[in-house]
Amino acid sequence: MAQLAAVLGTGQTHHAAKRLDVSMAGLCREAVDRALIDAGVELADIDAIVLGKAPDLFEGVMMPELHLADALGATGKPLLRVHTAGSVGGSTAVVAASLVQAGIHRRVLAVAFEKQSESNAMWALSVPTPFVMPVHAGAGGYFAPHVRAYIRRAGAPEHIGALVAVKDRRNGARNPHAHLRQPDITLESVQASPMLWDPIRYDETCPSSDGAAAIVLGDETAARAAPGNVAWVHATAMRTEPTSFAGRDQVNPRAGQEAAAALWRQAGITDPLRQVDVAEIYVPFSWFEPMWLENLGFAEAGQGWKLTEAGETELAGRLPVNPSGGVLSTNPIGASGLLRFAEAARQVQGRAGAHQVEGARTAVGHAYGGGSQFFALWVVGADRPGD
Amino acid sequence: MPEVAVVGFAQSPAVRRTSASGNGVELLVPLFQQVYLDTGLSKQDIGFWCSGSSDYLAGRAFSFVSAVDAIGAFPPISESHVEMDAAWALYEAWVRLKLGEVDVALVYGFGKSSAGELRRVLALQLDPYLMTPLWPDSVSIAGLQARLGMAQGRWSERAMAEVAARSRADARDNPEAQLIGTPTIEELLDQPYLADPLRAHDCAPISDGAAVVVLAAGDRARELCPRPAWITGLEHRIDSGQLGARDLTAVPSAVAAARAAGSDGVQVAELHAPFTHQEILLRQQLGLDEARINPSGGVLAGNPMFAAGLARIGLAARHIHTGTADRVLAHATSGPCLQQNLVCVMGGED
């Protein structure tokens, strides 16, 4: 890349099932204002805005960035609207970073939101279309067979998913922004929760949240002017494959493997488990933690669940995964990816508060979407690349 | 920073209705074949893919996901999507090429307006709390803009009809055009109003269609195209989404984009003006008195939503490719009353 880019600041809303106290504009602005304060800049310092969100049918508004232009501070400026399904929050950060890396802008604001209470995501996912498999059971019904296939293929014990749920919800209790905060959750309580889509239980699923996230990215000059630590962007990657074709591996998709390989190569990382200090991975259903640990190359195929079972993904483990509580604690769909990217940045900036991983210097943000077919990733570090 | 050029372009015929699905696959596959044939490229040569489309136009969530099937995206590809006209997808691809990691990008856009009632669908782009519940449709809103300009003496119904007549006459040489003909101004002015002061000829037709543009960087562009259309300026801006908060007879976002892109001295301009008065407004605001406007017939001769802006860039680039111009401008718009605007200025090397 031509220029270096860094995260100058991040912001996110309070997340809840229904944020009836704010409009979409108010929701976005809550995250934007916090990010600007965190970055020590004002809207006037922002050269361009990139907005991400998942399908417009989730709010019932076509291209909401148009009516949000004023609230986003975009009026008179360039505004891009990214939509890459569930990976969109990650893609939004990647596109914003590329605008800085290409030397086009000095400071770019990435914003992502979802106000799911405005509409009904299950309905939006279930519009009947000819020749397309309907997802009337929602995302959980779609992904449950993939999880079942993983359990069989890896020979994983049935309680691994519940372990992830307990860890992420307890982590979420340390995060004042999290939607679900359940410090007292236990393995037994998760296993006693209703089975929704076998083998996925109620407590192993993400909530439906209203929320927004924002990141201010800047070039080297802007990074030097930032009041606090910045998170340098060391690598970004995006990969796509089709939803379905004969022989497709939905459990360990090749697009995810290739995105990760490109990411590690760009970041100069040869042993991810050793060299990465913390990972914010898109885990909307608990079992996706071990699945993505393998897909990303943190573990060999079939071995990811062993890291989870050994407690290595807990806050004090070898590779803390989702110290923020992750998607299992907070899921404004379009913003969930940007939250992962922002939380990764906060960790290496040393600003993660009660869910800070001690001494974190290299972090990964990850998002996926569609039928496990769109992947967006970045590596951020406390050290300037090349130093 | 490598220079980037348009080296390939294809668009489907704009038609009132296709039997193709809303996900664009049937529209896109022949266009991919066409640009592969024209450039000698194959799927494996494309380093980055980017598309523009709208779920609301297709009437379903994730319509762009199925469009990926048109590519044959395995092994996996590097790809992105904007929920905008694909002219903005071209912008994202241009940034990616500027980074120097890949040297060829393919951009596509598709829209099947016939899947719904377009003027009502577009009402969903307005402020959902205060405006959409009133269901002001896109043609009626444009009518308010046209009336404002007439009240200021900026244009007349006759001047608008002249734009329509010129567009349809020019479109006779455009094999992808939907509306062609040689109506007289009097014939047009005899027609009834659709949304006073707009008549049917003042409004772009409702079209299904798709467009594909291939971008390449540096020497790769020279290999692929005898006369690449080098992008010398590519800028976009947005104005307020509150219709009452902006002067609808001005387009500050288009003016700022054109100024930043360096629009002086262009010989041809392909303007994305879905209404006759908007072409006049853009011409006035961008100072395009010297340029030939919309020799393709413009979107008044065919307006595939979410592909039409990208097609302006492809059509303008063709003038460089064929040597009929040395410096051209393409414009794309989005949102009600020209709210969001992109300007792409291109030139030949020799």
Image (cartoon, helix red, strand yellow):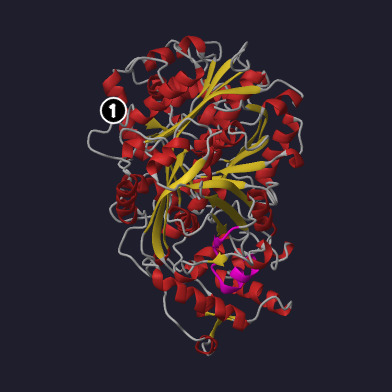
Position of residue A31 relative to residue B303, above or below, is above
In which quadrant is the N terminus of chain B drawn? top right
Give the residue type at disc 1.
Ala
Position of residue A170 relative to residue B326, above or below, is above
State yes or no: residue A105 in magenta.
no
Q: Nearer the viewer, residue B91 or A18?
A: B91
Residue B302, percent from left and from top: 44, 68
Residue B158, percent from left and from top: 60, 83
Q: Nearer the viewer, residue A191 or A111?
A: A111
Which residues lie in the magenta part? Answer: B266-282
Q: Which of B144 and A184 is in front in this view?
A: B144
Q: Look at the image and tell me whether residue B319 can be seen.
A: yes
Occupied quadrant, residue B123: bottom right
Position of residue A224 relative to residue A335, above or below, is above
Q: Which residue lies furthest to the front in this view?
A: B350
In the visual, does B9 lie left or right of A118? left
Q: Look at the image and tell me whether residue A13 can be seen.
A: no
Query: Total number of numbered labels?
Result: 1
Label 1, residues with CA under 10 Å away: few <14, some 14-19, many ≥20: few
Occupied quadrant, residue A252: top left
Q: Residue furthest left?
A: A246
Q: Which of A302 and A218 is in front in this view?
A: A218
Residue B272, percent from left and from top: 54, 62
Residue of label 1: A149
Report the chain holding disc 1.
Answer: A
Position of residue B314 relative to residue B16, above or below, is above
Residue A206, percent from left and from top: 48, 34
Q: SS at mark 1?
A: helix
